[in-house]
Amino acid sequence: MATRVIIDTDPGIDDAQAILFALFCGEFEIDALTTVFGNVPAKTAAANVLRLLEMAGRTEIPVYLGAAEPLVRRRLHYAPKVHGKRGFGDRKLKRPRGKIQKNYAAVELARRIVQAAGEITILALGPLTNIALAIRLEPQFVEHVQEIIFMGGIVAGLRPGRNAQQAAVEVEEELLFRGSNVSAVATANVLNDPEAAKIVFNAGFRRFTMMGQDVTRPTRMLPQRREGLRQARGEIADFLYEITGYYGKSYIREQIAGFPVHDLLVMIYALRPALFETRLLHVDVETEGTLTEGMTVADFRPYSKVKPNVNVCLKADANAIFDWYEKVIMTACLARAQGTNS
């Protein structure tokens, strides 16, 4: 039985990898895609979603435009050095043929969730503004969401459970992988709208999973994996190879092989949670600290009396993830080639 989802997104190169996987893997029933500001402006994100749906031949899936700004603060930086000005590197983009639906993303999220109570999981790949707005719009929204899987945040530091010798050997690697990407302590999808993140983290969802950079940064696509995409050939493979080349350049400064595929892990977890190690923790979002704004603060204390509210991903089986990703993309490319030749 297919997993029923709504994808809230801001594509974005890693978003594109994730969405194409979701469209081709055959295990999702995608009710809609909603867009939010983040890697690019909200309207650009919507246009990119339409392009991805056309590329995959799935134009029947509706697309809704969402929040263009954070709830409280006007802080719109986007990420052209990582994703390009229009989200797909420096690739020349044609105007999409499809149209954005008339309804607003937060309204549509609330409507669809309540109408299909307990059936839909939200895959949140960008700032949480649309979801926070849906919470405020519809009192029944929180209780009727099956699960939210959010790509963002970091619980930071060396993971608990390692002895001193292990920590001493691995500290340099850990520090490289555990650093946040837009401040010393915060990741982009939280810092872009920390007030929205705080609302969502504390809303009381029956299950809220955080796919943070504790696990996404170490799960990196190595050069030989990327080269494998080129061997598949065809529009999809060429597109992915080109945009990941642009994306990978922004990670060269880290002096670590490959680049992370942050959003893809949300899709994988939704279908194969056994490939991840998780821990239930209480996590809150800092919105008032001068140096710690946007920090996702996790309480690891075994004696803490604070009730856990977040299922935090801490480890992933990278080889299994990339093997499956490659299989899905290769199969899609082969099917396209056979369809063209028939």
Image (cartoon, rainbow, N blue to C red):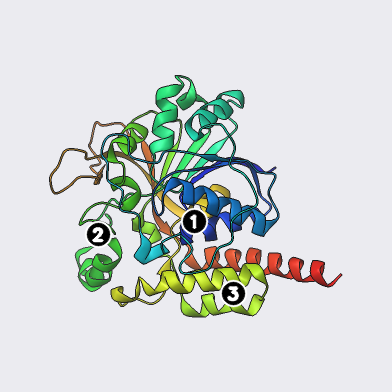
- Residue visible at 43% across and 58% down? 262
Q: Which element is circle 1 on?
A: helix
- Residue linked to disc 1: 15
Within 10 Å of the Cα at label 1, are there few (<14), some (14-19), or many (20+) other Cα atoms? many
Name the kind of residue labelled 2 in the image: Leu
The alpha-carbon separation of the residues under discs 2 and 1 comes to: 27 Å
**Marks 2 and 1 in Cβ contact (< 8 Å):** no
**Relative to 330, does residue 207 appear above or below in the rendering?**
above
- Residue linked to disc 2: 158
- Residue visible at 23% across and 57% down? 157
Name the kind of residue labelled 3 in the image: Leu
The answer to whether residue 162 of the structure is visible from this angle is yes
- Residue visible at 54% across and 47% down? 270
Q: Residue 277 carries which label?
A: none
**Marks 1 and 3 in Cβ contact (< 8 Å):** no
The alpha-carbon separation of the residues under discs 1 and 3 comes to: 17 Å
Q: Is 42 situated left or right of 28 in this image? A: left
Residue 57, percent from left and from top:
71, 55
The quadrant in which residue 251 appears is bottom left
Residue 205, percent from left and from top:
43, 30
Name the kind of residue labelled 1 in the image: Asp
The alpha-carbon separation of the residues under discs 2 and 3 comes to: 34 Å
Q: Which element is circle 2 on?
A: loop
**Relative to 82, does residue 304 appear above or below in the rendering?**
above
Q: Which of marks 1 and 3 is nearer the N terminus?
A: 1
**Relative to 219, does residue 277 appear above or below in the rendering?**
above
**Marks 2 and 3 in Cβ contact (< 8 Å):** no
Residue 342, percent from left and from top:
87, 69
Q: Residue 229 carries which label?
A: 3
Q: Which element is circle 3 on?
A: helix
